[in-house]
Amino acid sequence: MYYRNDTFSHSSNEAIMLKKLLFAATTVSILIGAIIFTKLGQFTAMDEAAQNMVMPAGTVTAMLVEDRQWEQTIIATATVTAVQGVEVSAETGGRVKKISFKSGSMVNKGDVLIQLDTASEDAQLASAEATAALAKASLTRVRKLEKQNLSSQDALDSAEAKVKETVAQMHNVRA
């Protein structure tokens, strides 16, 4: 009997819980349906109000017509932008020494627009020329020594390579 009573109360609890759950689900469904129905009614009312809305009449100003001379120019404040524009940049950086145009002016192909300060490049070129001259003088000495068999072929090859390298550096600075 103890077991029967315990089993009976367990299944009875499940039935009560199931009824409560079913009641809660039904209540929530009814609330959600009421909210949706209310919102649909509001949207319908807004749509009808928008369709029945009358736009206000525009304001009209009346003037007397009179003969007078047509003005060809009108004074107004405006912003003008160029139809075509070009962004100009230099291949190398540096300090600007001279600007040879005014903003907005027309320029032609080949016109010098900006002149850069070349003092640094001039110094680099002078250094490269001096290094090339030293390498050529060294090559001349090594050739004289090589003719007298007082220098090796390796020293001659090295001196010739040094001349080619310094001349290439000089041309690179000029470019």
Image (cartoon, helix red, strand yellow):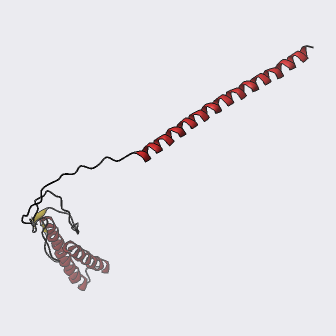
The image quadrant of residue 52 is top left
Q: Residue furthest top?
A: 2
Count of marks placed on residues = 0
- Asked if 110 appears above or below 80 in the picture, the reply is below
Q: Residue furthest bottom?
A: 147
The N terminus: image quadrant? top right
> Quick check: 128 left or right of 154?
left
- Asked if 85 appears above or below 13 in the picture, the reply is below
> Quick check: 157 left or right of 29?
left
Q: Nearer the viewer, residue 172 or 154?
A: 172
The C terminus: image quadrant? bottom left
The image quadrant of residue 134 is bottom left
Question: At 14% across and 56% down in the image, what residue appears?
Answer: 77
Q: Residue furthest right?
A: 1
- Coordinates of residue 4 in the picture (x, y in percent): 90, 17
Question: At 15% across and 72% down in the image, what residue appears?
Answer: 130
- Coordinates of residue 108 in the picture (x, y in percent): 15, 76
> Quick check: 36 left or right of 70?
right
- Coordinates of residue 102 in the picture (x, y in percent): 10, 66
Question: At 11% across and 62% down in the image, what residue appears?
Answer: 74
- Asked if 84 appears above or below 54 in the picture, the reply is below
Q: Nearer the viewer, residue 159 or 72?
A: 72
The image quadrant of residue 35 is top right
Q: Nearer the viewer, residue 85 or 26?
A: 26
Q: Nearer the viewer, residue 125 or 44?
A: 44
- Coordinates of residue 85 in the picture (x, y in percent): 22, 67
Q: Residue furthest left?
A: 69
